[in-house]
């Protein structure tokens, strides 16, 4: 089990109301959202650093990454 630290976070009232509709575990939900945002930020930093060192991604590289992440158009149409 990971260590935790208790903090106070202020959110807009309407967001808290919607959050409570979604989960009974607000702390867990917020922790997951923060973890996802941190991963997103770190990945963006890595991608920017890669482009600084190696130049912009080509259209082919972007298409390959897109298909690895989301699957190819053929795979999506056969799954439907």
Image (cartoon, rainbow, N blue to C red):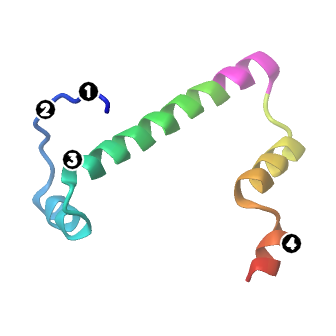
Q: Which mark is residue 27?
A: 3
Q: Which residue is label 1 attached to?
A: 3
Residue 30 drawn in magenta = no
Front residue (pair 2, 51): 2
Q: Closer to the camera: disc 4 or disc 2? A: 2
Q: Alpha carbon of mark 2 to alpha carbon of mark 3: how far?
A: 10 Å
Q: List x then y, in percent, for residue 75.
A: 82, 70
Label 2 secondary element: loop
3 over 32 or under it: above or below:
above
Q: Alpha carbon of mark 4 to alpha carbon of mark 2: how far?
A: 48 Å
Q: Which mark is residue 17?
A: none
Q: Alpha carbon of mark 4 to alpha carbon of mark 1: how far?
A: 44 Å
Q: Earlier in the sequence, mark 4 or mark 2?
A: 2
Label 1 secondary element: loop
Corner quadrant of residue 43: top right
Q: Earlier in the sequence, mark 4 or mark 3?
A: 3
Q: Which residue is label 4 attached to?
A: 74
């Amino acid at each position: 089990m990971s260590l935790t630290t208790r903090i106070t976070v202020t959110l807009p009232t309407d967001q808290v109301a919607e959050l409570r509709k979604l989960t009974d575990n607000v702390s867990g939900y917020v922790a997951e959202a923060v973890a996802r945002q941190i991963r997103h930020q770190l990945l963006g930093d890595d991608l920017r650093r890669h482009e600084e060192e190696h130049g912009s991604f080509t259209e082919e590289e972007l298409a390959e990454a897109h298909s690895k992440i989301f699957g190819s158009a053929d795979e999506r149409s056969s799954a439907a």
